[in-house]
Amino acid sequence: MRTPQVFSDKDTLRAIAERIVATHHAHIRMSLPAITEMVRATYDADSDQANVRELRDTWCSLSSFIEYHEEQEERFVFNLIKSLEDSDTLHVFHCKSIQRPLGVMEKEHQQIRNEMGKIRELTGDYTPTASIPIILCKTLTALADFECHLRWHFYDEEAVLFPRAIAREALLASRSEQEKGIPA
Ligand SMILES: [Fe+2]
Ligand SMILES: [Fe+2]
């Protein structure tokens, strides 16, 4: 099990975003194909069980959604966040405020948590029984580890990166109002 990342107050938005990509997103890129292969092999070994089929279908659609989510962050959202530091003046985004895309990311996190919850139910909290095939046993361990890592990943985004980006945007907005002579 990994330990949580610790960010200091001095870490820039760019540094935090880059570390999230280098650790959490790299872990996802490495884990998704390996787990998909295990889930498929589990289905091939025991395709008569309805819950094994449901596990395969739920995981395959969830893993595509997670890939899509991470890509949106890297190509769009994290670049907007970094741009808040690139200048001391408020940049007006086409989405108006950074809060909008961050709200979408948080909703997607919740969707992902809900789907992981379904997987947890289907696997009885990833609990192996004495008679299950070894491949299912390995799959349960991999899924449990994946969910644990995902919790830290979302924590680092929702509790560290996103609030600091919102605070930076608010600071730039208040400076810009002061410059225009508008009382706060
Ligand atoms: Fe992410
Ligand atoms: Fe995310």
Image (spheres, rainbow, N blue to C red):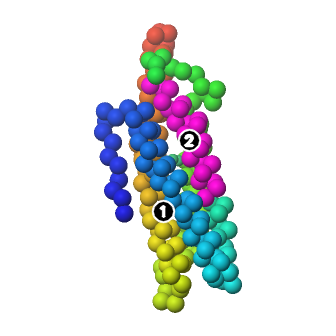
Who's the residue at 31% across and 36% down the image?
9
Report which quarter residue 178 is drawn in. Answer: top left
Q: Is residue 25 visible?
A: yes
Residue kind at label 1, given as amino acid type: Phe
Q: Is 84 located above or below residue 126 in the figure?
A: above
Q: Nearer the viewer, residue 86 or 181?
A: 86
Q: Is residue 87 magenta?
A: no
Q: Where's residue 66, x and y in %?
A: 59, 53
User: Looking at the rendering, in which quadrant would you find the C terminus?
Assistant: top left
Residue 38 appears left or right of 11: right
Q: Nearer the viewer, residue 114 or 41?
A: 41
Q: Is residue 124 visible?
A: no
Q: Is 46 located above or below residue 107 in the figure?
A: below
Please, what secondary structure does the residue beneath circle 1 have? helix
Q: Where's residue 123, x and y in %?
A: 55, 76
Cα distance in 3D space between marks 1 and 2: 19 Å
Q: Where's residue 81, x and y in %?
A: 50, 32
Q: Earlier in the sequence, mark 1 or mark 2?
A: 2
Q: Where's residue 108, x and y in %?
A: 59, 50
Range of residues picked out in magenta? 63-85
Residue tagged by mark 2? Answer: 73
Who's the residue at 62% across and 60% down the image?
62
Q: Nearer the viewer, residue 58 or 110?
A: 58
Please, what secondary structure does the residue beneath circle 2 have? helix
Label 2 near ligand 1 (CB < 8 Å): yes
Residue tagged by mark 1? Answer: 146
Residue kind at label 2, given as amino acid type: Glu
Who's the residue at 48% across and 17% down the image?
89
Who's the residue at 46% across and 33% down the image?
165
